Every structure is written in C-alpha cells, then in structure tokens.
Image (cartoon, rainbow, N blue to C red):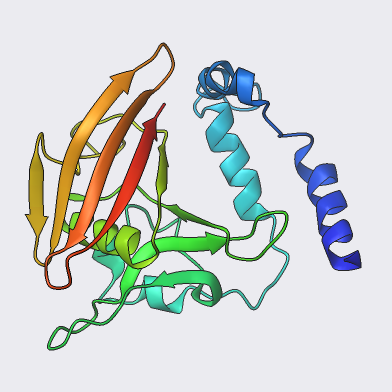
Amino acid sequence: QYIFLYRALAELAYFGDTEIDQKSLATTIEALKQPSSENVEISRLELQFQRLKAFQEDIRKTTTMGSSEENKSKNRSDACIPYDKNRVILAPIPGRDHCTYINASFIDGYDDENNFVITQDPMEDTIFDFWRMIFEQRIKTIVMFSEIGDGPNKCPRYWADEEMKYENLLVSYIQSESGPYYTKREFTVTNCKTNDTIHVTQFQY
C-alpha cells in the first residue's frame, strides 16, 4: 500500500496530472497530437512517452527477449521494447522456434495486477501473433489510437471485410458503427481446432 502511494506521488510530481475525463477523451487526444511547447518537432503525446521512458524506477527491468536478434524484426522501434518481467508470452507452437514473443506488455490497474495489455500496432508479419494474443489472453476490448494505412507511423488493416483465417484462428468481422469521435467494430475470433470463440469489440479513435 505504501509503495503504491509513493509511486503515485512520484509519478504525479514528475508527469503532472495526466488523467483524462471520458467526455473529453477525443478532444484531449487531438490536443496531444499538436506540437509540444518544449519541442515543435514532436507532439505533446510523444513528449509524454519520452518522459515515461526516462522515468526509470527499477534498473532491473531488462529487455533481453525483445532485443534478441531473433525478435528484433517484430518491433516497430528499438526505443519501445517490452520488459522481460511483464511481457506477454505467447503459447509455443510445436516445431516452430522463437514464436512466443510479441511486442506487448501487461500493465496494472488500480485494483489488480496485469489488468491491461498495451501493445504496438501490428505489422504485416505480426498480425497472426496479434490475434493469437487476443485469443489466448481472452481480450474482449481493443482500444486503437492509430490510423489505418501504409508507412512506418500507420497501422496495416489487420482484419478483412468478412473473415480471414490466420493458421488455426478465424477472425470474422461482424459489424461497425461510426460516431463523431470513434468507430466501433465487432469481431469474433474462433479457434478452428477447438471451436472455441470469443467476441471482441474494437474502438478506433
């Protein structure tokens, strides 16, 4: 309890108040995309991530797995690699080496540990791993802040108009609805070997 209070106060002193009210989420995100006052070449959101990276509480946090030669190509950037201690570990696939790594980390909520998963946008050759993680971790909600498109700063479309099979996983697009600030999409993900299905909702801002 005291450790939590110390960390909370330390983060508040270092970062300031970064809490966002639900009603102002969309407008706040747009404001964070604007150039920062400290450096016009980066956005306010990028500046916050730089500060977050610099805020090292535990020097024992290593990134050995994500930095290995076998897994380097699965990272969008060398500057954002999950710590070994809280990275998401995919289930091994028989006969396939180096298949348990994905650039994703568990993060704690207020009430419990590992309540959320934060991950990079999938790349063309990591889309299967992305859906594996969604299914294996029984993730029901995806919150997406990036734009769909080509290029290093955009996310490839990791779903099809109807359905797409990624080895043993069938990802089916059900429906979508668009609002002024976000698009909501519904999917099902089915393990074709076991017929186990989960329902996934995606919010793209």
137 left or right, relative to 23: left
Residue in the picture at 67% in, 74% down: 59
Residue in the picture at 42% in, 33% down: 145
Q: Residue furthest right?
A: 2
Q: Is residue 20 above or below residue 156?
A: above
Task: Estimate the x, y position of residue 132 in percent, counting from the top left.
Answer: 26, 64
Residue in the picture at 55% in, 76% down: 85
Q: Is residue 117 above or below residue 58?
A: above
Q: Residue furthest front?
A: 195
Frontmost residue, 113 versus 96: 113
Q: Residue furthest bottom?
A: 95
Frontmost residue, 191 versus 25: 191
Is residue 154 shown to the viewer in this render?
A: no
165 left or right, relative to 80: left
Q: Is residue 189 above or below residue 136?
A: above
Number of numbered discs visible in the structure rendering: 0
Look at the image and tell me in which quarter the C terminus lies. Answer: top left
- Hey, which quadrant is residue 138 in on the image? bottom left
Task: Estimate the x, y position of residue 175 in percent, counting from the top left.
Answer: 22, 30
Frontmost residue, 104 versus 167: 167
58 left or right, relative to 188: right
Q: Residue furthest top?
A: 180
3 left or right, relative to 159: right
- Hey, which quadrant is residue 62 in on the image? bottom right
Task: Estimate the x, y position of residue 123 in percent, counting from the top left.
Answer: 22, 50
Is residue 29 shown to the viewer in this render?
A: yes
Look at the image and tell me in which quarter the N terminus lies. Answer: bottom right
Residue in the picture at 16% in, 45% down: 172
